[in-house]
Amino acid sequence: GKGTNCRAILERIRSGVLPAEARVVISDVLDAPILDIAREFSILNAYLPPGRFRTRLEPQAEMELVRMLRDAGAELVILAGFMRVLKSPMIEAFPRRILNIHPALLPKFPG
């Protein structure tokens, strides 16, 4: 996507409307606009190579995602435009602390 959800969230944090702190922005797309948006807001950002699968992360990549989020001190994870299904490592690392902003009705239109 174009990063509109990411930008909206970061703008609300900056303005004080959303009482939160963005710790890190991570993308599985090397040239994703959200990485530029994160830099614009002076937020730590990183690219996570997803591996060979189109609909999910490779197990090693998912473990790396968990590590990156923990290292950044993330308490809540917002998936904005993240188009991969996450498995147990991520779900278990952040139980009831993952918010998925999905552009279509789930589970009818996954991915």
Image (cartoon, rainbow, N blue to C red):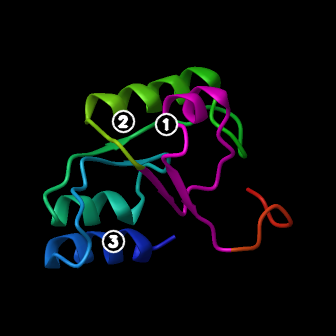
- Image position of 11 (left or right of 104): left
Q: CA distance from mark 2 to mark 1?
A: 10 Å
Q: Nearer the viewer, residue 65 or 31?
A: 65
Residue of label 1: 94
- In the picture shown, does residue 38 fall above or below 96? below
Looking at marks 3 and 1 on the same chain, the residue that comes earlier in the sequence is marked by 3
Amino acid type at circle 3 is: Ile
Q: Quadrant of residue 40?
A: bottom left
| Contact between labelled residues 2 and 3, with CB atoms less than 8 Å apart | no
Q: CA distance from mark 3 to mark 2?
A: 18 Å
SS for dot 1? loop
- Image position of 1 (left or right of 77): right
The label shown at residue 69 is 2
10 Å neighbourhood of mark 3: few (<14), some, or many (≥20)?
some
| Contact between labelled residues 1 and 2, with CB atoms less than 8 Å apart | yes
- In the picture shown, does residue 6 fall above or below 79? below
Q: Magenta stretch: residue 108 in it?
A: no
SS for dot 3? helix
SS for dot 2? helix
10 Å neighbourhood of mark 2: few (<14), some, or many (≥20)?
many
Magenta region, residue range? 77-103
- In the picture shown, does residue 52 fall above or below 31? above
Image point (35%, 42%), residue name: 75
Residue of label 3: 9
Looking at marks 2 and 1 on the same chain, the residue that comes earlier in the sequence is marked by 2
Q: Quadrant of residue 109?
A: bottom right
Which residue is most to the top?
A: 60
Q: Horizontal and vertical percent for residue 53? A: 71, 37
- In the picture shown, does residue 103 fall above or below 106? below
Looking at marks 3 and 2 on the same chain, the residue that comes earlier in the sequence is marked by 3
Image point (36%, 35%), residue name: 69
- Image position of 23 (left or right of 92): left
